[in-house]
Amino acid sequence: MSYQTIRVDHDGPLLTITLNRPERLNAMPPQMADEIGQVFYDLGDARAVLITGEGKGFCSGADLSARGESSALTGKGGSHEALINHYNPAISHLIRADVPVICAVNGPAAGVGCSLALAADFTLAGKSAYFLQAFVNIGLVPDGGSTWLLARAIGRARATRMMMLGEKIGAEQAEEWGLIYKCVDDAALMDEAHALADKLANGPTLAYAKMKRNIATALDGDLPQVLLAEAEAQFLAGKSADAKEGGKAFLEKRKAEFTGK
């Protein structure tokens, strides 16, 4: 498939999405959201996805000019329609993906770009990167799942601080807060992201999918729900070829070679 706002590269079991509008710090028009959603809708044989941005930014937020700044700011249909039909589905596809998702944040991650970055299972950021929810400065509210993601990642007080004060949160502080997985030197970002992505792309894919679903259940459910979800997931994972290989490798005292099956 041909994409206009992103690049998609395959390297064995790893699929890489690069947001490709560097002249606008990868600001996301509805078309970019649709293209990201399409990739996640049909991952093919990919066993992990790495997302990053071209140039000096990860994603500076929704591209207001792409759908009419006046309607986006005044809320007269444009912003609501774009969220419901474009941005929200993309974030949902990413969060629900049955494979690990890694985001390498190489600059500003603002607005829906912040949502995109934090929706990943692992978010790495270069030291010069930052996370921003600046909606308050124009009288709007965070969207794209930011409220849900921030409150669960860093708690009510810090989520309120980010949203109501519109402060930039640098990568080092983001790591300290538990907002992201890891802050690294800018020059090392892509090497570290690729190393992690390659590890996950060659891991027990079915087990990862069940882990993701169980974590979601744990965040929104109660203990009985989690215990049941774990038992059911363990039953299914235990029948996989990867589980058989893992047990065999353990007995033979060698590294397991998972195939994602």
Image (cartoon, helix red, strand yellow):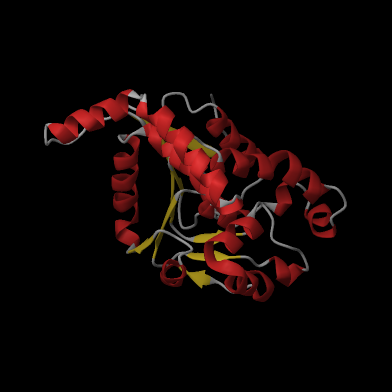
Q: Quadrant of the C terminus?
A: top left
Residue located farthest toward the right when viewing the structure as drawn: 76
Query: Along the horizontal axis of the image, is 64 left or right of 106?
Result: right
Q: Is residue 95 above or below residue 8?
A: below
- Please provide percent x and percent y for residue 55: 45, 53
Residue 198 in which image quadrant: top left
- Please provide percent x and percent y for residue 172: 41, 70
Q: Foreground: 90 or 222?
A: 222
Residue 236 in which image quadrant: top left
Q: Residue at x 48, y 63 (%)?
A: 179
Q: Is residue 57 above or below residue 13?
A: below
Residue 257 appears in the rendering = no
Residue located farthest toward the left when viewing the structure as drawn: 253
Q: Is residue 36 above or below residue 240?
A: below
Q: Foreground: 204 or 105?
A: 204
Q: Is residue 123 above or below residue 236?
A: below
Residue located farthest toward the front when viewing the structure as drawn: 224
Residue 126 appears in the rendering = yes
| Count of marks overlaid on the render | 0
Query: Along the horizontal axis of the image, is 223 left or right of 87?
Result: left
Query: Along the horizontal axis of the image, is 236 left or right of 256?
Result: right
- Please provide percent x and percent y for residue 100: 43, 41
Q: Residue at x 57, y 68 (%)?
A: 155
Q: Residue at x 31, y 59 (%)?
A: 187
Q: Residue at x 41, y 34 (%)?
A: 234
- Please provide percent x and percent y for residue 132: 58, 66
